[in-house]
Every structure is written in structure tokens, then in C-alpha cells.
Image (cartoon, grey):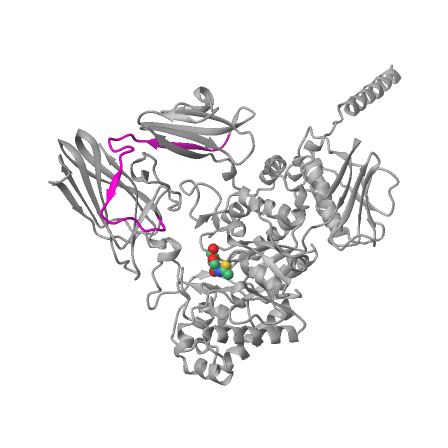
Amino acid sequence: MRKSIQFLSLLSLLLILGCQDHQRHTYTENDINIIPKPSELELRPGSFTFNNATRFELGGLGKEEWVRPLVHKFRTVAGWDLKIVESAPTNYVKLVEDRQLGEEAYRLQVEREGVIISAKGLPGFLYGLESLRQLLPKEIESNERVVDVSWEIPNVTINDAPRFKWRGLMLDVSRHFFGKEYVKKTIDRLVMLKMNTLHLHLVDDQGWRIEIKKYPKLTQIGAFRVNREDQHWNVRDTPRSGEDATYGGFYTQEDIREIVAYATARGITVVPEIEMPAHVMSALAAYPELSCFENPIRVPPGGVWPITEIYCAGKEGTFEFLEDVLLEVMDLFPSQYIHVGGDEATKNNWKICPHCQKRIKDEGLKNVEELQSYFMKRIERFVSGKGRTLIGWDEILEGGLPSGATVMSWRGMEGGLEASKAGHDVIMTPTEYCYFDYYQGDQDREPLAFPAYVPLRKVYDFEPLAKGMDPSQENHILGGQANLWSEYIPTESHSEYMLFPRVSAMAEVLWSLREDRDWNDFSRRIQSAFGRYRLLGINYSKSAYQLTAEANSKDGKLNISLKNEFPDPTIRYSMNGDDLSKEGMPYTGPITVTGTSTLSAALFKEGRQVGEPFKKHFEYHKALDKTPEYTDLYHENYPGEDKQVLVNVLRGSKDFHDGQWQGWLVKDMEVIIDLKAEEEVQKVVVGSIENQGAGIYFPKGMEVWTSLDGKDFDSVGQIEREYQANGIPELRNFEMGFEKRPARYIKVKMKNLEHAPSGGDAWLFIDEVLVQ
Ligand code: TNX
């Protein structure tokens, strides 16, 4: 009896195993979602399945820490304690040294017996392990036990190596400070994406973030500012006298050593940036003697523009200070490259400073541009004298580039083209593809950001080699980098939101072969990666799921087309607020909106709504498609997308570049609209935007007139409005109601504030004049 039970249970075990074997996956290329895409991948039939007897064989390489993260993951998700052993004849993950492979290359072979990763050393082994991790089911990223998952991976051979050797991310830890734990977390994520450079922007006006033993006030004073986090970056009140500077932080030298060691063990180089000669008000607040006129200044709590408080280029003391600082920095950072900024210096002080003028004379320089060049060349000599290589932003080209300098090209690709032609190395970081402080979705739906637009697709379209480069220039392009400036990014979760998923697109641009770049294929892989990011607790952005609308009006009717960046989107829409998942109609082509209504729409995947829904209200009115006549034409930079833009029913968004806005600088907006026939009118509504940080202000008044003949106009009302400080971009309607009256012509005037309270000329922006 007993025997037969045993026999039965053995039978059922075999059956279960047999079934499992049966249920084994048949994989296709579409099941492989590695980002960045490997340069060579062969998929073979069959698979390997991890179980609690799988062993790691390191072949005497002795680098247990390389595989520890994966061992740890299996302990978490499966409860296994996978062993590291001398030799595992079967059921193995083996690391095998292969001296023939390139510095960062690896080979990953998966067979029924196990996995073999070959590389020359670090970081190839890590990259192989990262690809292995991405072959595993996404649940491997879970931080709790998971059941019903078979840890099976397809049989593949991957031969992989990067296209570019500089695959960078810059974190601006000055405008907002991010602690060392976040930096280490970010390093882990860069390794996951096979990126290899972390550039830390350690110095800027709003905070000095690295302890320098010889100059303790840099962090005692320079690392803290008064707290104005409740105000828009560009309109923050300056510190009041006696007010404590409480907001900020810095890395001690111990912290820096910890970060650098952590990065080095993961194949990542940390490149420090010590800004000069501008973006250094934090240093001048601590040591005013380093400036031309030694004005006592405080660390500014927000944006400063233009930046006129800069280091004095005449005093020897400035150079002594900078050399001392750089010595400590070079001692902490083994990086070959030392970044010294060089951007955005307004040299007004240099023009009138006796020290600077003397320097200009003594050195036979022509002007302050050449003085900046002198400054950077002198620092370059110091840095290269210590065996390191200087990097600067592309402004270091102005007035003569220091020999031996590497250029980070940010104002487009031109700086990089010029520098590479002159035989200098270049890292490409043009704003329009690489600035992750810019919006990645609709400005009305996104958290406040720098007012420009770099969606996921745009990052993916980045190409570091410019057209027209010859092969020798191409060889000077070391790679590219994403820059996360942090003026608008106060928290870690917000930083993650701005980084992901755009940094994954950047990783692929910089690693994968140019001919493999395929948006449709990436779309599939990135959406699969979202599942991993979720399990990893990364606050990634879902903005790529947003719908964008394009509209045109014709013969008094609006046609709206809806789009999404990902291919073949399933979109449902409804008019007037119906529940999209129940009553939503499938979107098949442009929707005609014939009267006042609200359009809602959303993207659906496998029957479920993904991303935020899209919602727009269209208010029909009597001026639709009429032609406004302007007293003073709008500014040539802001004409709107066509002549009818003020009366096309389409409203502007907070993106004042979206084509729906017309702008007037200092001047008022005054238009006359001919309704083409006598109509009963009783209200005029005018849409405006305020973005004080960008110099755009609500009107200071409004007046409306009506007329029957276009000659005699009756004023029907007038409003005056006081200026109010306003920290955030805001849309607002200005309304004028009056007793119903017949009219054919409507005249509307919106008064420009003319002069911004902070100085400078004021913009007035209008998107629509509604006549009701
Ligand atoms: C320009 S890029 C800057 C930064 C700002 C950034 C905002 C560069 C060298 N300078 O100081 O943070 O724009 O996007």
C-alpha cells in the first residue's frame, strides 16, 4: 500500500514535470525586450530554467559582488539561496574571461544546460548580467515573493558592444540637492541601461555641493539658501536681511569617496563639474574677494539672469583658489575628465574692473571674450599638467578654445561640429534632444518644467553624429549625454519622473547600432520595460501615452485628429463626458465637432485605459472663422499658426509656443472683428496666459466696443486690473458682459502691462476672442 502511494506520487511528480516541460515557452524575437538593443542576437529553440539548484561559477575571477544582485533577487522572489561554486557541470551561470573581447563588450550564451557570460572584465560581465536580468520574466524585479512564475529564459547567443564610449547622464545637484543614496540608486539604474558616465554638476549659483577642506565656507555658506520653494524659480524674492539660509545640503569628502567607489565597482565614471567663471554666486557669497567688486551677496534662492556676479579674471587670488579647489577635486575623483563649466558668463563687471582691465592689457587681449578664453586656457594648463583632461560647455570655443580641451556641445550640434573640425573631442548634448528638464508631455497636464518640449520620441531620434561630418570628425565624437537640470525638480520622485523612460531611449541611442534604431520596435520594448520599472519602484512617466490633438477649422466646423507617439494606438473618445471604457467610441479618423462640446479620449491597451485621459472643451461663438483686423500687429516671433488663430475656437495650452497664441511686446492688443452680419451680442471673452518667469503678464485692462457700421463704436465696458505677482504659469479668461445689443463689428482692446516689475519689457499673449 505504502509503496503504491510513493509510486503514485512519483508518477504525479513526473507528470507535473512533464507538463511543465510541455508548457515551456516557444519564444519569438518579440519576447526579447532588452534595452538597449544588443548589436547581435540569435534566438535558438529551447530554453533554460533557473531553479533552486542553479549555481554560479565564477572561474576564479573572484568577483562575487558582480553576481550578488542577481542572487539577491532570486532570494527575494523565489526564496532560493543560489550558491557560488568552484565548478558547476550543469545548471549553471558561468562567467568566463575572454581577453579577445573589447573593453565593454560581452557575449551571453543561453543553452539548456545553463548560461555562459564572456567578457574581458568589468564592465562587460555586468552588462552581460544585466542582459540576462532583462531576459528573465519581469517579476524578477519584484521586492516580494512571487508565485506561479517560471524563471525561464530563451536560448540565445548575444554578442554585444557599445556604439559610443561616452554614454552619460548629468545630474544637477546644485539647483536642488540630491542625497548620496539617490545618487547611488541612479548609478544602479545607469548600469541597468549600460550607461557608463555620471556627470555631477556640483557648483552653481544656487548651491555649492562639495566639501573643500581648504575653503570650509564654500559649504558652510555656499551650500544653503533661504527657502523659497513655494515660489516659481524665476520670481523668487531675494533674501531678507537677517533671514536664515536653511535650504540645501552638500556631500562631504567621505560621501564623495563612497559615491565614487560605488560607481567604480559598477563600471561607471563620475565626472565632477566645478563651474567657472559664472554660475558661482554660491562661492562668491562665501568668498566675496573672488569677485571683481567684492559686493556682499547671498546665495540666490532661485533663478538669476543675466549672471553678472562672476569670478574676477584679473586677480591672481581667483586662480590660486580654483587650483586649490581643483586639487582636492582631482584627489577625490579618479575620472580622466574634469568639467569646468564655462557657460553663460555675462562679463559686464570685467569690462569695468581695474584688475580685469589690467589683465587684458598685460596679456595683450582684445576684449572680455578673449579674457574668458585666457581664463579657461590657464585652467586647462593646470588640469592637463595634472594628467587630466578639461571639459567645458561649448562657450569655451568663444575667443579661442584651449588646446587639449573636450567640448560639451549643448547649444545645438554646431559647437560640436566646430570643435571636432579643429581636432577636439566632443560630447553631444544638444538641448532639443538631451535636456530632460524640458516637458515630456502636454504642459497643461505635466508638473511644472522648463518651458520647452522633449518627448520620448524626440530623445529616440537623437543622432550624435551630425550630417556632413567626415570620418575624422566622427572619431572625435565620444558620445552623448542627457542633462537633468534641476531648477524645477525639488524631489527624488520628480527626478525619476523626468528621467524615465527618456533615459532608456538615450541609452539605446548611445549603445545600439544606428541601423537598428527602430521606433516601433523600441515602443514595444519600452512598454514592456514599464512593468519592470513599476516593480522597481521607479516613478516613471506615462506621458508617452498621452494623446495629442491636431485641429483645423473649415467652414465654421472643427476637425480634430488624435495621435499618440506609439504605433497603432487604440483610441476611444466620447463627446460630453461619457465614460470612455463603457460608452467610448473607437477612434478611426478625424472627428468633426459641430457645436460647443467637450471631447474626451484615451488610449486603450488590451481593453484597459492607459495614461491620463485627454479632455478639451470647444466653445463655439459668433466670431468663429471671421477675420480680425489688428491695430498693432502681433510680434513677428509670435504670430500664431494662422490668421484665424484668435477666432478658431481652439484654445492655447500653457505651452505658449503651441501655435494658438499671439504675442505683443509692450504694445496692446486691439482688434476689430467683422461678424459679416448683424448679430445679437452680450458678452466678449478673451483668453490670456501669464508666465511671469518668461516675461508674460496678464493684461492690465480690457475695453470692448460695438458698432453697426464699422465707423462709430460704442464702448460697452472697461475693466482695469492691478498687477499681481504670480509664481506659476496660469491660463485665464477675461470677460465682459453687457446688455444684449445688435452689432456687426466688435472692437476689443487688451492693455499690455508694458514694463515688467522685475525690469524688462512685458509680453501680452492672447489665444482667443470669443463673441457671444
Ligand atoms: C542652460 S546648459 C544652462 C543651465 C540651465 C539650463 C536649463 C548650460 C551649460 N547652462 O544652467 O540649468 O539651461 O535648461
The residue shown at (44%, 24%) is 580
Asked which quadrant contains residue 404, the reply is bottom right
Q: Residue furthest top?
A: 1
Q: Position of residue 10 (x, y in %)?
A: 84, 21
Q: Nearer the viewer, residue 611 or 50?
A: 611
Q: Nearer the viewer, residue 336 or 471?
A: 471
Q: Position of residue 533 (x, y in %)?
A: 59, 40
- Number of residue marks: 0
The residue shown at (33%, 55%) is 695
Boundaries of the magenta span: 610-638
Q: Position of residue 22 (x, y in %)?
A: 78, 22
Q: Quadrant of the C terminus?
A: top left
Q: Nearer the viewer, residue 348 or 143?
A: 348
Would residue 255 be visible to someone looking at this image?
no
Q: Is residue 425 above or below residue 328?
A: above
Q: Quadrant of the N terminus?
A: top right
Would residue 738 be visible to someone looking at this image?
yes
Query: Is 150 placed left or right of 505 in the picture?
Result: right
Q: Is residue 418 above or below residue 385?
A: above
The residue shown at (47%, 84%) is 361
